[in-house]
Amino acid sequence: MRTTFLLLLLAPAGAVAQEASPYVPLSWWGTPFVEHLIARGRLADPTPLTRPFRAADLLRALDAVDSTAVTSAEWAVVRRMRADLTRTERGPAARIDAHAGVAASSHARRDPLREAGPGHATFSGGAALTLYFGPAVIVTHPYFDTRLKWDPDWYGKKDRIVAGKASEAYISAQFRFAELFFGILDRNWGPSPVQGLLLSDSPYGPDHLSISIGTGGLRLDGFATQLNSLTDTAGLVHNRYMILHRLWVRPPGRWTFDLWEGSVLSGVGRQLEPWYLNLVNVGYITQVNTGTNVNSFLGFDVQRKAALTVFAQGMLDDIQIDRKTAADQKPSSYGLTLGAQGTLPRFSAAWTFFYTRVTNLTYRNEDNFQTPIYFGLGTGRNFSDYDQATLRASFMAPPSPSILLMPEVTLLRQGEGDLHLPHPPVSAYPSMPTIFSGVVTRTLRLALAGRVARGRWTVSGDGGVHLISNAGHVTGASKTRWVGSVQLEWRTKKEGRIP
C-alpha cells in the first residue's frame, strides 16, 4: 500500500492532469432510465460489464445522445439527468445532495422476487457530501432508513426506531492510467441486467481497497476486502478475506469481455498475504506454490453490443476431473448466465431476457469459513441451488415526459441447497445432485415496476403476484402472494467552491 501511494504521488504531471469524478451510485434515481436507454441502443454504455459509472463518463455518454433518435419522453429525462450530473464549479469544490422519502411495502427485503420480512411503512433520509480536490474525490453519504430494522438481511442494530449506515463513503485518487480507491461503494462485475457471480450489490457495503490500471480498452482491476470474522465451536476467531483480480478488455468494435479470479482466505490469526494482492499473478498458482489454503474461483463475462445484444457470464468454483477416490465424486460447483437484449421499435421499447443458474454446492467449501459471505449475505449471489428465467421490457409512457414502465415475467426454481449451510461430508457426494437438492419450490412472478421523475420528486414502485408451488419445499403445498411496494422521494443539491 505504501509503495502504491508513493508511486502515484511521484507520477508525472501529465498522468495526474485530469480531475477526479465521483461514482454514480447504483441507487441513483436515474439508473433505471440509463439502463433503459442502453438496452434501446440510444445511449452508449460507458463501461460495459462494470457498474457503477463514474459521473464524468456517464455525462459524456448522455451529451452524445441524438435528440432525433429518442422519443420526447426519453429526451426530457436525458436533459434532467445531464442537469443533475453537471458540475457548476471548477477547482476545489463541494456538493451536498440531500434526500428524504417515505415508502410502503408488503415485505422488508430489497429483492421483491425473494421477498421476506413483514409489510410496513417506512421513512428514510440522508445527505451525501462530495469534495473535489483535483485528482482526488471524497464522498461520504450517511443515511437512515427504518426499513433496515425489518430487513432479515440487515446485520446491524435492529432495536432502535431508526437504523442507518453509510451508503457510500470513499476516497478515490484518479490518474490518467490508474485509480486508487478505498471505502464503501456498491459494485457489480458482469452484465448489468443480473447480479455478478462473485461481486455485486448483494451485501451491505463492505469497505474495500480497489486499484485499476489501464485505458478505456484494456484494464487490470483489483479488489480486496476483509469479510466479517467468525468464531468456531472452540471459541477461536477466524479472520476472513476476499481478493479479486480482473483483466477487462474492450477492443475496437462490438465486443467487451473480461477474465477474473477470486480467492477467499480464512484462518485463526491469519493476515492477508501480500502475494494474493499481486494483480499480474494468478491466485490459484500462488495457492499451489505457497501451500496456503484458500477457496478459489475462476470466471468470465462477455458482451456483444448490436441490434441484438448478447451477453454471458460463468464462474467455476469446483470441478472434479479424476474419478479415482470418494472425494472425486463431489458434484460440480458453478454459476452461469446467458442473455440477450433488443428493441421493440414500434413501441419505442426495449426487452431483456436472461437465464441464470447457480448449482447446489457453489460458494461452499470444505473449510466452512472460506465462503464469500459478508455478514450473512453473499458477495455475489445470495442464493445457490436455483435457476431463473426472466423476461423484462421497458418503455417511456406518453404523454408524460418521465414515466418508465417495466413489466416482468420470471420463473424461479429453488432447491433446498443453500450457500449458508455447512459443506457436506465426502460420504454424501454420491447421492447429492449437482442442482436441485430436495423438494424444488417453483415461483412464477408476474409484475410491473414503474418510476416517475419530475423536478425534485421521484415516485417508484412495483407490484405483482407470485404463484408458488411446493411452497416452503413442501410437496404439493401452494401459495399465492401479492407483492408490492411504493416510494416517494424528494431530493435537492447545492454546490459551492472550497476556499
Image: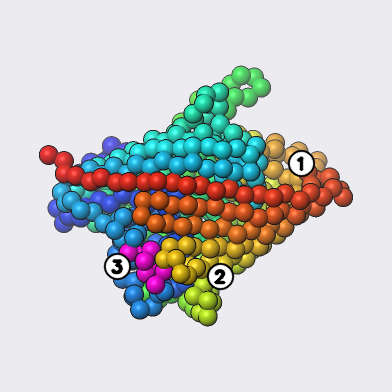
Tell me the quarter of the picture where residue 373 sits.
Answer: top right
Can residue 24 be seen at all in this image of the molecule? yes
Residue range of the region highlighted in magenta in the rendering: 72-79
Q: Amino acid at mark 2?
A: Trp
Mark 3 residue type: Asp
The label nearer to you, 2 versus 1, is 2
Residue furthest to the top in view is 235
Image: 56 above or below 284:
below
- Side (left or right) of 139 relative to 258: left
Work out whether residue 488 or residue 354 is closer to the camera in this orientation and state it. 488
Query: Which mark identifies residue 351?
Result: 2
- Badge 3 or badge 2: first in the primary sequence: 3
Tell me which amino acid carries mark 1: Val
Location of residue 424 (image quadrant): top right
Q: Which mark is residue 63?
A: 3
Q: Is residue 132 visible?
A: no
The span from disc 1 to disc 3 (Cα, nearest Å) is 58 Å
Q: Position of residue 372 (x, y in %)?
A: 56, 41
Asked if residue 492 is among those painted magenta in the image, a careful observer would answer: no
- Tag 1–tag 3 contact (CB < 8 Å): no
Quadrant for the N terminus, please: top left
Please state which of residues 172 and 14 is positioned toward the viewer in this rendering: 172
Q: Which mark is residue 426?
A: 1
Residue 239 locus on image (x, y percent): 52, 29
Q: Nearer the viewer, mark 1 or mark 3?
A: 3
At x 41%, y 40%, the residue is: 100
At a point 58% along the width and 48% down the height, the residue shown is 485
Q: Position of residue 451 (x, y in %)?
A: 49, 57
Q: Mark 3 and 2 residues: CB-CB less than 8 Å, in contact?
A: no
Seen at 36% across and 51% down, the residue is 456
